[in-house]
Image (tube, rainbow, N blue to C red):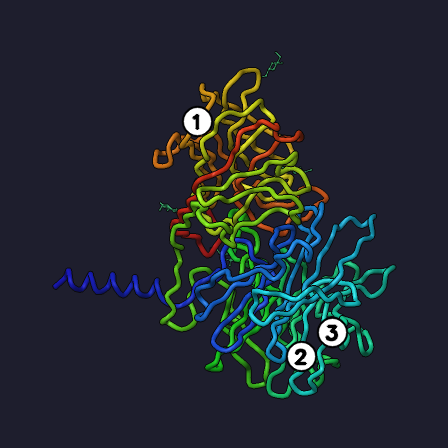
Amino acid sequence: MMTTLLVMLLYSWLFALATAIRNPIISGWNPDPSVLRVGDSYYVATSSFEYFPSTPIYKSTDLGNWELISHAFADPQSQHLFGVPTGAGSWAPTLSYIDGTFYIACMTRWTYDPVAKVWPRIYFASSVDLVEWSDLTWAEPWGIDPSLFHDPQSKKTYLNLMAPNNNEDRIWGIYQCEISLITGKCIDSYHSLWNGTLTHNINSRPEGPKMFYRLGFYYLMIAEGGTDDLHRTTIARSGSPTGPWEPNPNNPLLFNGAYGYDNLTVQSTGHSTLVETPGGDWYAAFLARRKIKGSSPLGRETFLTPVKWSQEGWPILNNEEPIMLSKSFGPSDVHQHLVPATFHDEFTSSVLHPSWYQLRTPYTSNFALDGHGLTFKPNVYGLSDRDTPAALLRKQKSLNMTFSATLSAIQGLYGPKMTVGISAYLSEFQHQDIGVTGCVNATGLCLYTTLLKNCTALSKQIPLNQTSISGLTLHIRATPLDYQLGYSLHPHLTPTYLATISSSWQAFAPANYLVFEGNSFALFASGGGEPWPYNGHDVGFTEVVETYFEENIPDYDIW
Ligand SMILES: *[C@@H]1O[C@H](CO)[C@@H](O)[C@H](O)[C@H]1NC(C)=O
Ligand SMILES: *[C@@H]1O[C@H](CO)[C@@H](O)[C@H](O)[C@H]1NC(C)=O
Ligand SMILES: *[C@@H]1O[C@H](CO)[C@@H](O)[C@H](O)[C@H]1NC(C)=O
Ligand SMILES: *[C@@H]1O[C@H](CO)[C@@H](O)[C@H](O)[C@H]1NC(C)=O
């Protein structure tokens, strides 16, 4: 009797955990989500910066489980990410659906060096299936965070964006023009739309404009406060898509920092888009960070929250409460996989799984797939170079996981410049590597680790006492607070860990740079500044396994 009751209690507890939706809905760095529903399917596009292919698109039918289905810019000709530093590249896409065709508007920031005066330009592309995309149409205005809004009343299409007031002061605001989808040119006046709710000066960042229409009102929802802890969502409305705009008296709509709770784990909430279900319920997708002792190794992830409407016709996000990780919401029949299934890739296909990325626009062939594994074609570059090394990266999906990669048999490496290994990678300045190299001052193979702390490299090498090796497996154990780098002589043996680094080293921008991504795991091989020897042996990987564990991340950032 007692046992039955306990089993029932346990069952209902497990059932409660396994149902409804919990945040983040797309884990691993996926900032600036733009959500769109067409029919019974929901789509989210997110920023990808210097990663290629660019601009991932995820699909869901229940808002809780999301699958990566394609990338908007998978053609190297469409993404000119040559030499872009960390944090530059392609930002903040917006999905639209106009007359049966998908559109995506996006921006590429070639560099952010203020001396170079290179400013971001805006483009859009169209698709009927989100897989095959048209060539780019370049829009006339320059700026950031573009979105296309098709007015259901007038059938006119507007480009809304964040842009500077002029080329001297560069005070940013939300701007607009009616645009031709054919030419990308403004076909009516280009004008200032709204400057948001905060003091408008050189430091203001009213950004991410998203426009929608509901019951006679046009709504203009934006992000303000910069993308760090002051980031928030605000809204205004008008009887016309060109304004004038009436700000919501209850702004901000979403702002975890507003509660005085800088002790909350979830911070930087903002950059929202709204979506309506077929049943008339509303949700907001937005970006937020999970703070771990103040820093966020996974960067900004995609979150969701329920939306209600006030009697006065203003949206209310999450009942005006702060966003908490422990809170579930939405339909109770959504079975969300809070701990994802193991990821296992043996590279048996002739094409890569879509979740693998290269850095910047690949212009040489850096790897080959022969059905039995991944073979790198290493070049002169490595992960510290602002170019395209022979490297494949996957976003870190969980704060509690392992990334393990088994090397193809190594027949020999000539000297310490040749390397093949894996890395916890944040930027060209911040990557923590373990791999195999030719030993310094000795023949044979060495294991090595290199930790980069503020561009200072701490390296060590351990002789393997052999000139060839097979079955060697490299491991990164990621926990919320640190990364451990290890190896095992066979895939299934327990790893020996050689180095540990705090996860906070993978979660800040180096001086004078921006880091908008979160941590990824990389496979790489490099000639270390020299061509891979003409008679060098092949290097590569036969298997990658990611195992995820539960993430008991508290609501308050107290560890
Ligand atoms: C978090 O900060 C708020 C505001 O300062 C405070 O009231 C609350 O007690 C803190 N919570 C915890 C768990 O420390
Ligand atoms: C390699 O040999 C050189 C010259 O003897 C020495 O200066 C250097 O410290 C050695 N390096 C290592 C890693 O043993
Ligand atoms: C890293 O270097 C920057 C200056 O370049 C310094 O401000 C910062 O405190 C350093 N961080 C650590 C953890 O040493
Ligand atoms: C990470 O996973 C391990 C293994 O399941 C577990 O013991 C640990 O509590 C988890 N850590 C967190 C922070 O959830």
State the image coordinates of residue 13 (x, y, percent, origin top left): 29, 63
> Which one is in front in this view, the residue at disc 3 or the one at disc 2?
3
308 w.r.t. 195: above or below: below
Q: Could you tell me how far apart the alpha carbons at marks 2 and 1 are, in whole angstroms?
A: 60 Å
Left or right, 353 with reference to 217: left
Q: Nearer the viewer, residue 246 or 162?
A: 162
Q: Which mark is residue 358?
A: none
Q: Which residue is mark 3?
A: 182
Specify the quadrant of the image occupied by residue 346.
Answer: top left
Residue 80 to residue 141: above or below: above
**x, y (%) of residue 46?**
59, 61
Q: What residue did someone put label 1 on?
A: 469
In the depicted view, which residue is nearer to us: 417 or 199? 417
For the point 57% across and 15% down, which residue is it?
441
- Residue 150's disc is 2
Image point (56%, 27%), residue name: 459
Specify whether tag 1 is near ligand 2 (CB below 8 Å).
no
The local crowd at label 2, few if under 14, some if 14 to 19, many if 20 or more residues have their Cα within 10 Å, is many
Say which amino acid is labelled 2: His
- Density class for disc 3 (Cα within 10 Å; few <14, some 14-19, many ≥20) is few
Specify whether 18 is left or right of 514: left
Identified by mark 3, the residue type is: Ile
In the figure, residue 339 lies in which quadrant?
bottom left
x and y percent of residue 496 in the render? 40, 30
> Callout 3: helix, strand or loop?
loop
Are the two marked residues, 3 and 2, in contact with CB atoms closer than 8 angstroms? no
Q: Residues within 10 Å of mark 1 (few under 14, many from 20)?
A: some
Amino acid type assigned to the residue bearing label 1 in the image: Ile
Quadrant occupied by the N terminus: bottom left
Mark 1 vs 3, N-terminal side: 3
